[in-house]
Image: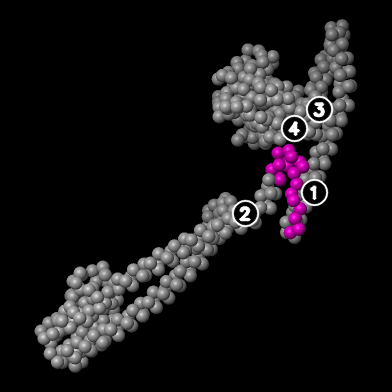
Amino acid sequence: MSPALLAWARRVPLRTRVVAVFALGSVAVSALVAVVTWNLTTKYMLQQREDGVLRQATMNAQLVEAALQRDSAGLGDLLTGLASSPEAAIFVRQRAGWSTRRAVTEGIGPADLPPALIAAAARGDTARQRLRVRGIPVVAVAMPLPGTGEQFVEVFPLRELDRTFRFISLTLIAGIVVSGGLGASLGLWAGRRALRPLTQLTAAAARVAGGDLGARLPVRRDPDLGPIAAAFNETAADLQARVERDARFASDVSHELRSPVTTMTAAMEVLVRRRDEVPPAARHAIDLLDTDLRRFRRLVGDLLEISKVDQGAFRLSAERLDLGELAANVVARSCPGVPVRTDGACPVLGDRRRLEQAVSNLVDNAERHGRGLVGVTVSGAHGRARLEVDDAGPGVPAAERERVFERFARVSDRARHVDDTGSGLGLALVAQHVRLHAGRVWVTDRPGGGARFVMELAGFAGGWFAVGPEERIESGGEP
């Protein structure tokens, strides 16, 4: 098999290949049976027909020979009486020429027969041949009349036998088609039965990848499938325990840090108010400490927010919102003067605080890491509300577009890092909040240069879409 064909076969789904194998196997077996049946049946029926034709021709030749020996005056009537059907033809070659009884409809004559057949009878041999005369299948028998020195030729039509063969061939072909259909149905059933454990494994793995760490496979007693299910369940349980342990640790650390961070922030506010009273070197130290403390405080807040979702200790307060109005308010607070374009109302049902944080993080990401926010566009179509945040940076490399939504991810392109004071959790929080709202978020190139972060949520299309944590879907990457 050629490499191209092998590559194509690998791209075909396994279930399709199973169905194809069953269907082709059924067609091959039924075709083999049909060919054998056709050959045996046709050969047997033709042999029987030719033997019967030869016997009848021999008897007719004997009657013609006896009539010629007595008197040839009534030969025409005799030939007409001997014809087995209106389509049959009988010829007797005498010294004066041919005495014939031609077929009524087709008008078959001696000139329509092969010369070799007539020559064999003239040599004293009995000859038999199947042929088509004027499109009609016939069997011609030629034999000598020893008592008179003349030749007898009779043509027997095979129209009925030809119709029988056509019926048999159509029946066999229909049997092949039906067998192929039954094989495909059997293959589909067998494929579903055989691949059901694999389908369950894929569904469970997808649920785990989507955040449902409690997904498990049913335990089977099958010696082949049982170990796979047990290994998957054990792996999923270990993963769930580790994630819960890490989330609990992050939550505990965040909670423990909130009090000292609050104290440090209050003390820093006092220092900032009195920074003009200290020497320049001390003022510089206060500024650096204030910047790092703000970053640390934001990191603690983001960790606490993420840990709540990881532990399931959260609650969505859904309300009807206009995504365009929400985005305009966020941009007005963070980047006054940056245009927010909308094409009308884009209502969504969601948690205002989390959606505001998601939009704010996208805007902040454009300002800090994308060389400035260029514009925000909100639109709605096909029951979806869409928000696009454009920046003026170098864009996000294609290889980094999925990883950029991971926690503590950094884009490898140093040219994008205009401000490196971020916590590395902003976009991860965006992806998390969007998942909670049954939406999706990805990054692509902005026409004209830069990056475009796109967020899609279920919108209003004849009714409000209910959302909730059970409707989480995968985020990250361009669809």
Residue 315, located in which quarter of the rendered image?
top right
**138 or 336: nearer the viewer:** 138
In the image, residue 219 lies in the stretch drawn in magenta: yes
- Dot 4 or dot 3, earlier in sequence: 3
Instruction: Point out the stretch of residues depicted in magenta.
Output: 204-222
Question: Are there few (<14), some (14-19), or many (20+) residues within 10 Å of tag 2?
Answer: some
- Dot 4 or dot 2, earlier in sequence: 2
In the image, residue 415 lies in the stretch drawn in magenta: no
Q: Which residue is mark 4?
A: 407
- Dot 4 or dot 1, earlier in sequence: 1
Q: Residue at x 67, y 15 (%)?
A: 329
**288 or 39: nearer the viewer:** 39
Q: Which residue is mark 2?
A: 192
- Dot 1 or dot 2, earlier in sequence: 2
Disc 3, SS: helix
Q: Residue at x 74, y 40 (%)?
A: 212
Residue 166 higher or lower than 349, as above or below: below
Q: CA distance from mark 2 to mark 3?
A: 45 Å
Task: Provide the major secondary structure of the magenta segment.
Answer: loop
- 290 left or right of 196? right
- Image quarter (top left, top right, bottom left or bottom right) of the C terminus: top right
Q: Which residue is mark 1?
A: 234
Residue 414, located in which quarter of the rendered image?
top right
Kind of residue indicated by mark 4: Arg
Kind of residue indicated by mark 2: Arg
Q: Residue 264 appears at what percent x and percent y?
A: 88, 18
Q: Which residue is mark 3?
A: 304
Disc 4, SS: loop
Q: Residue 447 appears at what percent x and percent y?
A: 55, 26
